[in-house]
Image (cartoon, helix red, strand yellow):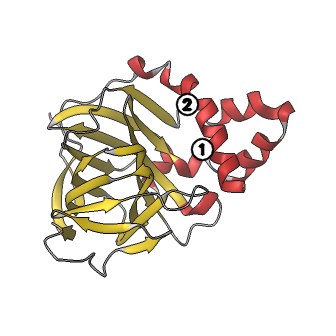
């Protein structure tokens, strides 16, 4: 119930965030370079690798790709892998299929001051790519503000600048390549090799991302070639 309330509130606030999307400059150059490989899966096995932790299980292998479908109305279907690093480069191919949204999320399971240990996310939907600093926008004190109708304006002000939406038309039948870079307090997204989204917010620099996961609302979202590396900052140009 609490989870549903938060999702409903975030959905209500999303249009306000999207209005400012055009004001956010997206760096043309990557934030970081790939270091050590942390995780890789091309889904060539007949079943889902045991490296994936399934929550509200609905993970299957379909024609050499990972299929994630929502099985319970109250919660998205989740497939999670261990990461254990601060700065990351995450790359994967995806097809929206019948999903209304795909969330690519980093958590810290030891972080208890915010909702679910969430640190940051990229949300993919048919009309938008959305980047968020969940550590700062989902702090418990802000959750309490949101419950009080008299503090709604205060809650909106408290999360200003913690998320950014970028209008994008995504074809649900097409495969896309997505890369997420998280370096320091910055997160950059590229789609098919082109810069597509950027966010700078303090919570992104949280010292540990223990887990990465996909959360799917809807049916038959497909994923392939999931790769995660430790990120090394790109030296600034002189």
Q: Identify the residue at image location x=33%, y=24%.
A: 25
Q: Identify the residue at image location x=49%, y=62%.
A: 71
Please identify the quarter of the rendering in which residue 40 is found: bottom left
Q: Nearer the viewer, residue 220 or 146?
A: 220
Q: Nearer the viewer, residue 153 or 80?
A: 80
In the shown orientation, is residue 2 left or right of residue 238? right
Please identify the quarter of the rendering in which residue 200 is found: top left
**Total numbered circles:** 2
Name above or below for residue 197 compared with residue 33: above
In the shown orientation, is residue 172 left or right of residue 45? right
Q: Gap in Å between the C-alphas at discs 2 and 1?
A: 13 Å
Q: Identify the residue at image location x=81%, y=33%.
A: 151
Q: Which mark is residue 199?
A: none
In the shown orientation, is residue 155 left or right of residue 167? right
Mark 1, residue position:
137
Give the structural element (helix, strand or loop) at label 2: helix
The quarter of the rendered structure image containing the N terminus is bottom right
Residue 114 lies, in percent from the top left, at 63, 58
Give the structural element (helix, strand or loop) at label 1: helix
The quarter of the rendered structure image containing the C terminus is top left
Crowding around mark 1 (Cα neighbors within 10 Å: few <14, some 14 to 19, many 20+) is many
Task: Determine if residue 132 is in view.
Answer: yes
Residue that extends furthest to the bottom in the rendered view of this protein: 50
Q: Which mark is residue 14?
A: 2
């Amino acid at each position: 119930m609490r989870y549903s309330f938060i999702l409903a509130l975030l959905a209500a606030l999303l249009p306000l965030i999207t209005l400012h999307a055009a004001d956010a400059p997206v760096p043309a150059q990557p934030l970081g370079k790939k270091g050590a490989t942390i995780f890789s899966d091309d889904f060539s096995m007949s079943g889902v690798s045991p490296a994936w932790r399934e929550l509200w299980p609905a993970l299957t292998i379909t024609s050499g790709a990972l299929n994630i479908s929502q099985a319970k109305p109250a919660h998205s279907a989740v497939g999670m892998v261990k990461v254990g690093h601060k700065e990351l480069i995450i790359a994967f191919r995806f097809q929206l299929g019948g999903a209304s949204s795909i969330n690519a999320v980093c958590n810290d399971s030891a972080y208890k001051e915010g909702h679910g240990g969430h640190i940051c996310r990229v949300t993919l939907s048919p009309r938008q790519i959305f980047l968020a600093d969940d550590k700062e926008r989902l702090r418990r004190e802000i959750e309490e503000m949101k419950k009080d109708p008299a503090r709604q304006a205060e809650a909106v002000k408290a999360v200003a600048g913690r998320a950014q939406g970028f209008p994008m038309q995504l074809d649900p039948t097409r495969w896309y390549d997505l890369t997420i870079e998280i370096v320091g307090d910055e997160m950059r997204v590229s789609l098919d090799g082109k810069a597509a989204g950027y966010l700078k917010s303090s919570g992104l620099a949280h010292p540990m991302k223990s887990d990465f996961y996909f959360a799917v609302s809807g049916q038959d979202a497909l994923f392939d070639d999931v790769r995660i590396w430790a990120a090394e900052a790109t030296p600034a140009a002189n």
